Amino acid sequence: MTDFSDRLPPNAFRRMDETPDELFYEPPRLVTHIDDGAIAGVTATYRRHLPAGGRILDVMSSWVSHLPNDVDYGEVVGHGMNAEELAANPRLDRWFVQNLNTTPALPLDDNAFDGAGLCVSIQYLTNPAAVMTDIARVLKPGAPLIVTFSHRCFPTKAVAIWQSISSEGHGQLVRMYLEAGGFEDIQLVEAVPPSPGCDPLYAVIGRAP
């Protein structure tokens, strides 16, 4: 893991609401957090980069994974903060609840997955370098991590640095996270360009070393 804290302002990872995350995520939210166009962009990006038949890790998941319905995967393992949401997700073969802000190490084997997705939740991580490093550990060499994000968030739980910069800055910040975690061949993709009345969607894709 590479330390990049000296490249960010003080208190970059502070939040308006510093109460335990378990309290905030205790009530299930069986809703989607981006519009249909952005969801389609997530699915299309997963279709292009996640290998059919592979073992997939869905990090910071909920009751939907946005994986393409017509693609079969060997196994989909979900992580999230609410058991009821995860239990309602039909794409997950198994799942576990864990607060990555207090425990970034995943209870998963090394080199176990062929790809991973992290959808519209990267803005809530307070120690993203540690989380990215452990995701890299559980991925097979060369396997992709796809981090997607839009302009929406829960403002009280999003870290300060995320709320202080533009969408272009978000892409550079996520690239920094992946670099700190050891990912390689990192690319930024504008999956759904901004347009009036619609949610944009951006993706940063890296490969495990």
Image: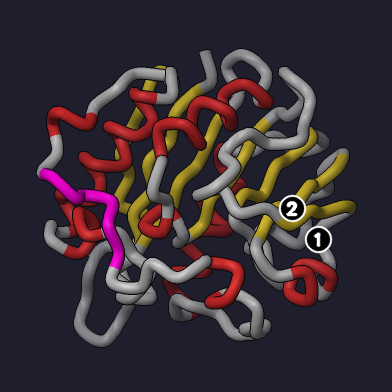
Q: Which residues are magenta?
A: 10-15
Q: Residue at label 2?
A: 78
Q: Residue at label 1?
A: 91
Assign a secondary structure to mark 1: loop
- In the picture, measured across the screen, residue 143 lies left or right of residue 19, that is right
- Identity of the residue drawn at 55% across and 80% down: 32
**Going by the picture, which residue comes out furthest to the front?**
19
Assign a secondary structure to mark 2: strand
Magenta segment, prevailing SS (helix, strand or loop): loop
Q: Between 73 and 134, which is closer to the camera in this rendering?
A: 134
- Identity of the residue drawn at 87% across and 39% down: 74
Give the number of the mark in front: 1 or 2.
2
Q: Relative to 27, say whether 17 is above or below.
A: above
Q: Are marks 1 and 2 in contact (CB under 8 Å)?
A: yes
Q: Relative to 125, say whether 15 is above or below.
A: below
Q: What x and y, as percent, mark residue 167?
A: 19, 58
Q: CA distance from mark 1 to mark 2?
A: 9 Å
Q: Residues within 10 Å of mark 2 (few under 14, many from 20)?
A: many
Q: Where is residue 206, by image quadrant?
A: top left
Which amino acid type is shown beneath numbered disc 1?
Answer: Arg
Q: Between 113 and 4, which is closer to the camera in this rendering?
A: 4
Q: Residues within 10 Å of mark 1 (few under 14, many from 20)?
A: many
Q: What x and y, as percent, mark residue 130?
A: 47, 31
Query: Residue 8 magenta-drawn?
Result: no
Q: Where is residue 73, by image quadrant?
A: top right
- In the picture, measured across the screen, residue 166 lies left or right of residue 200, that is left
Q: What x and y, as percent, mark residue 109?
A: 79, 24
